[in-house]
Amino acid sequence: MKLTYLFPHRLKLLSGIVFCITSIILLTALLDDLFLFEKFELKTTVFALNETGIMGQKKTFSFIENNIIDEITMTLFILSGLVFAFSKEKVEDEMTEKVRLDSLVWATYFNYIAFLFCTWFFYGVLYLNILMFAVFTHLLFFVIRFNWKMHQIRKTNCDEE
Amino acid sequence: MKNNVKVQRAIANLTQADLAEKIGVSRQTINAIEAGKYVPSTVLALKISKLFEKPVNDIFELEDTD
């Protein structure tokens, strides 16, 4: 049984680097109340299905001016994250598939349990930040758990005779 | 599930890496199977049985907990 929806192994290094960089940028930006994105301006016209302003004014199906630095960072994060998380290992076999599935289940549980905890213990504006965190921590937890497990398996000493 | 892959491998005079290469898995997977940490799929069990020219039942055995 071969999984066909995995990316080739050669993409792992490059996507890993991009994923690390964008993760750090996003984490820093979120902890800094998104001020980081305001320091770099890249204003352009974008098509908006909907834009709701702070005062509640709405625009639908229109072209608006927007700083797209955050959109670019998020796009790079999601794409590199998906490729890095779901690219083949050097030797891809059924045990790797099992570790991958286990990690995915583990990350899903962990992410939602952490989110549930935050729902009951964090209130106000901070909760909105946590909502944003939860969007990408699922992928982050999966990547950490999977690579940690693979690292543990790789370093197991063989008992060759 | 118990198995005697390690014994069969010794009889055939193969290293973990040799066996891994012949059936197309990583050496770590063979290591995990021998240590009882990983239960191989039917396909992999049949590949091992074919390689050692022994019935699957002679290599893998159910335990009471299975």
Image (cartoon, coloured by chain):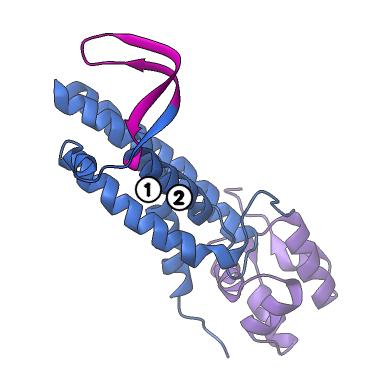
B44 up-or-down from A78: above or below: below
Q: Nearer the viewer, residue A29 or A86?
A: A29
User: What range is drawn magenta here?
Assistant: A47-69
Name the kind of residue labelled 2 in the image: Gly
Residue A62 part of the magenta-drawn span: yes
> Is residue A14 rendered to the left or right of residue B15?
left
Q: Are marks 1 and 2 in contact (CB under 8 Å)?
A: yes
Figure quadrant of residue A106: top left
Number of callouts in the render? 2
> Is residue B60 rendered to the left or right of residue A64?
right
Q: Chain of mark 1?
A: A
Q: Nearer the viewer, residue A125 or A59?
A: A59
> Is residue A130 rendered to the left or right of residue B52?
left
Crowding at label 1, few (<14), some or many (≥20) Cα neighbours within 10 Å? some
Which one of the lettered chains is coloured blue?
Answer: A
User: Which residue sits at x=64%, y=86%?
Assistant: B15
Question: To which residue does mark 2 refer?
Answer: A81
Question: To which residue does mark 1 refer?
Answer: A140
Assign a secondary structure to mark 2: helix
